[in-house]
Amino acid sequence: MDNNIKTVFFLSALTGLLVFAGFFLGGELGAVIALFFAGAINFFSYWFSDRIVLAMYGAQELKESEAQNIHAMVERLAKNAGIPKPRIFLAPINQPNAFATGRDPKHGVICFTYGILQALDKEELEGVTAHELGHIKNRDILIVSIVATLAGALALIARFAFYFGFLFSGRDKNNFAGSILGFLFFVLVTPIIAVMLQLAVSRSREYLADSTGARIAGSGQGLARGLLKLEQYAAKIPLDGGASNRATAHLFIVNPFEKGFFTTIFSTHPPVQKRVEKLNALAPR
């Protein structure tokens, strides 16, 4: 299935799940309130998410006078992509990595870590940059932000139901056991479904950015080699981070945090080896 079609399907499923959650707790009015709540958070994410994440990692704008070769590379690849040249930021992080942010191509941002400029060769860095430009071109930052917001809203509603659910579940005195089962299903299963849909969207957008980046760079070979290197570095020098930092994992080209059994299962990124296989299967432009 095409990655864009998958995204529409998963977004529709998440929206439907949110409406169901609101309806479950408050009927028709609850469904309307749930949608309004999600829309308000989306509005905030749309306008301010880029500033928040850049500040979170202490990133500073990289002036053209400080790195003319980097600016020239980004400008050339952005021209290939048919989008405006994004602003370039540098994060003081030793782990080689990169991410893109910004609400649309006119306000795009690419952030490199200090380590990636030291670790990758020219072709590999071009491949990674083209991948991030692919995210900007495909408006993935906005899409993933919406998905994360919907999933977060569902998690909040489920938490609310956990604390106050018995007040609602006991309303039907004639079917108290059925109400309790419905309540438990909602509290326990709905957040899991939301997370799985969120992960599915994030992974499909990564695959799409890989293929778009390969077209922008003219080949997927540099990106494929770069992904393998970045995965190795991430395992050797993972970033420290709490829950708020880990919530940004989907932005990076590879997951920058330490991986365990559960973090691997619930990873926002497809396995690097599968991404490399798909890239190697692409014909050069």
Image: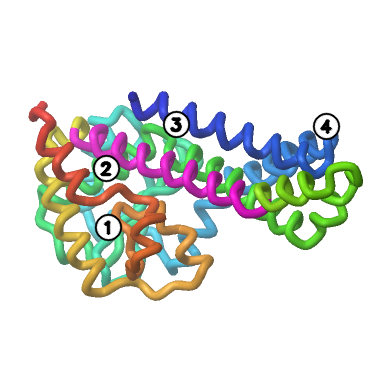
* Circle nearer the N terminus (1, 4): 4
Comparing labels 4 and 3, the label whose residue is closer to the camera: 4
Q: Is residue 184 left or right of residue 122?
A: right
- Residue 8: give x, y in percent of width and height: 48, 27
Q: Are marks 1 and 2 in contact (CB under 8 Å)?
A: no
Give the alpha-carbon distance from disc 1 to disc 2, as whole Å. Answer: 24 Å
- Residue 51: give x, y in percent of width and height: 52, 56
Q: Amino acid at mark 4?
A: Glu
Q: Is residue 93 left or right of residue 236?
A: right
Q: Are marks 4 and 3 in contact (CB under 8 Å)?
A: no
* Circle nearer the N terminus (2, 3): 3
**Tag 3 residue:** 7
Give the alpha-carbon distance from disc 4 to disc 3, as whole Å. Answer: 27 Å
Does the magenta-highlighted stretch encompass residue 282?
no
| Viewer-side residue, 158 vs 150 | 158
**Tag 1 residue:** 65
**Tag 4 residue:** 28
**Callout 1 secondary element:** loop
- Residue 95: give x, y in percent of width and height: 27, 69
Q: Amino acid at mark 2?
A: His
Q: Amino acid at mark 3?
A: Thr
Q: Which residues are magenta?
A: 187-214
Q: What's the residue at 30%, 38% (across, down)? A: 209
Comparing labels 3 and 1, the label whose residue is closer to the camera: 3
Q: Amino acid at mark 1?
A: Ser
The quarter holding residue 135 reads top left
Comparing labels 4 and 2, the label whose residue is closer to the camera: 4
**Tag 2 residue:** 131
